[in-house]
Image (cartoon, grey):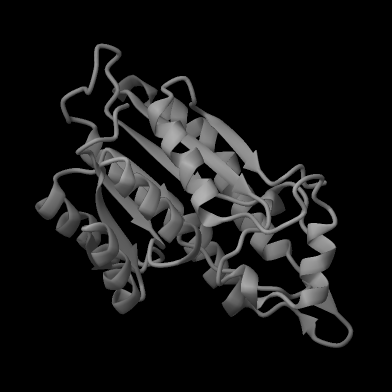
Amino acid sequence: MKIQDLSAVVTGGASGIGAGVVRVLAQAGAKIAVFDRNLELAEATAREVGGIAIACDVANDESVQQAFANAQAEHGAARILVNCAGIDTARKIASRKSGAHAIGPMQRVIDVNLVGTLSCCAHASTAMLDLEALDDDGERGVLINIASVAAFNAPNGQAVYAASKAGVVGATLPMARDLSRYGIRVVTIAPGLFDTPLAGTMDEQMTGQLLRRALFPQRKGRPEEIGSLVQHICENQMLNAATIRIDAGFF
């Protein structure tokens, strides 16, 4: 897939990994729509790359539908969707001190990270179904979802977050099977520890422990490094139905 002049939607695109993806795809020539709950920050990021900003709560299906309608009216149907919107909760499922994990924060993490990702994939791919193929192979678009290495190897206190991201990983293959007949690919990225506002909420001790579990380099990743992987996935048609870890060999 040649990215130049294609329409791309990046959820959670106002900051962190999403903003890194926005910058790389814009540099490659994509027409960018930044979806984010923080419209003010989304507008700042969109201005930086000549894109558009659209308020969107991915956990609210009406908000998702309206956001895609607005983006399509401006740029046409998206050929590229990158789901970066995500939240975290760090709490043990149960302990003597705090009792049972509260259901409210638990539900919100699942709604944003898993249901929100699936909702955006459903609406984006529906708009792609009847688009003209981009090449002789019949490719129409690509869905790229951001999971986490926590889906495979999460520390204590991350059961809910890990479950939400494991759900994204588990959906990758069946979604790719659903959409293969239409020339739509599905790929998931599982990052390790990256320099983002979400990672910044961890204390220094936890950050240090996680970095020591990486082989090389033992540093936080940069959002643009994920952006470069997103670009390669778009351009390499043989990448499909897979989850790619980008974690410096985290174990």
97 sits left or right of 118 in the view = right
Residue furthest out toward the right = 96
- For the point 30% across and 78% down, the residue is 40
Quadrant containing the N terminus is top left
201 sits left or right of 77 in the view = right
Query: Residue 92: where, in percent of width, then height?
Result: 79, 73
89 sits left or right of 227 in the view = right
Most foreground residue, 7 or 86: 7
Residue 155, above or below 55: above
Q: How many marks?
A: 0
32 sits left or right of 16 in the view = left
- For the point 30% across and 51% down, the residue is 9
Task: Tell me where residue 50 sits by quadrant.
Answer: bottom left
Most foreground residue, 209 or 99: 209
- For the point 60% across and 57% down, the residue is 164
Task: Tell me where residue 248 sits by quadrant.
Answer: top right
Residue furthest out toward the left = 73
Most foreground residue, 236 or 105: 236
Query: Residue 69: where, in percent of width, then height?
Result: 17, 55
Q: Is residue 123 visible?
A: no
Query: Residue 24: where, in percent of width, then height?
Result: 39, 47
Query: Residue 163: where, in percent of width, then height?
Result: 66, 56
- For the point 43% across and 49% down, the residue is 118
Residue 211, above or below 29: below
Residue furthest out toward the top = 136
Q: Is residue 192 visible?
A: yes
